[in-house]
Amino acid sequence: MVLKLYGNPISTCTKCAVVVLKEKNVPFKFIAIYFSKGEHKAPDFVAKQPFGQVPLLIRSHLLILFPDDDGFILYECRAIWRYIATKYASQGPALIPLGDLEKNALFEQAASSEQANFEPAQVIYYEKFYKKMIGQETDEAVVAENKAKLGGNLDVYEVILSKQAYVAGNVCLLYSYPGLPGPRPPPGEGEH
Ligand SMILES: N[C@@H](CCC(=O)N[C@@H](CS)C(=O)NCC(=O)O)C(=O)O
């Protein structure tokens, strides 16, 4: 059995999935999906990820090339985080507080807050970085609006972090570093 991660080298969502796989020391095969070639909208990819987006995790049998999955296919980077962190709970650092209702509820609070409050960072990244790469103009009004939103949210995180070490409490967990992987492509992997 092997895990295959289909992703794009400059995609932040892909990097989120990679960070958790690496943190848990889970072997996986990375398969690059290039937006510039439209690979994410190809019918065989969309058959597995109906939104035509990365990352996509597929559990495969080692020796079977096609079909390359054993029935387990997962998309949405946060679902991939949870799956890896839970399935490999006993190896590497504990990333989800399993078995403690209150700690888990605080973890869920941090998770929900991350999803709700860091979206402006993604919008800024899209406008300032991705659009430039595909030859489109940055919409500075959208950037300014989202910078203001993000700034306000980061001020709230400053307050939270003045009282505890990490956003999900005093232990470093899955959501302790919201927006962790930045938009930089890994060295030598600038193609998109
Ligand atoms: N909600 C999805 C979003 C995935 C997503 O937006 N992926 C981007 C790359 S970071 C993508 O594939 N963009 C291409 C497109 O939407 O056509 C997740 O969290 O995994």
Image (cartoon, grey):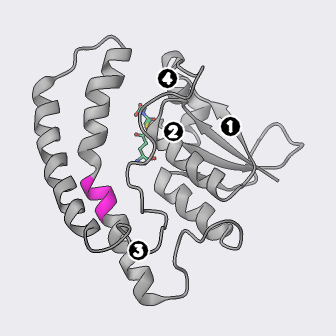
| Badge 4 element | helix
Amino acid under disc 4: Phe
Tell me whether circle 4 and circle 3 mark residues in contact (CB < 8 Å). no
**Residue 93 image position (x, y, % from top left):** 62, 67
Label the magenta part by its dominant secondary structure: helix
Residue holding disc 1: 30
| Badge 2 element | loop
Q: Which quadrant of the view contains residue 157?
A: bottom left
Mark closest to the chain's N terminus, 4 or 2:
4
Query: Does any atom of ligand 1 lie closer than 8 Å to the CB of label 2?
Result: yes
Residue holding disc 2: 54
Q: Quadrant of ligand 1?
A: top left
Amino acid under disc 3: Phe
Residue holding disc 3: 107
Query: Does any atom of ligand 1 lie closer than 8 Å to the CB of label 4?
Result: yes
Q: Residues within 10 Å of mark 4 (few under 14, many from 20)?
A: some
Spatial distance from mark 1 to mark 4, Cα to Cα?
16 Å
Judged left or right of residue 142, residue 56 is: right
Mark closest to the chain's N terminus, 3 or 1:
1
Above or below — where is 171 with respect to 184?
below
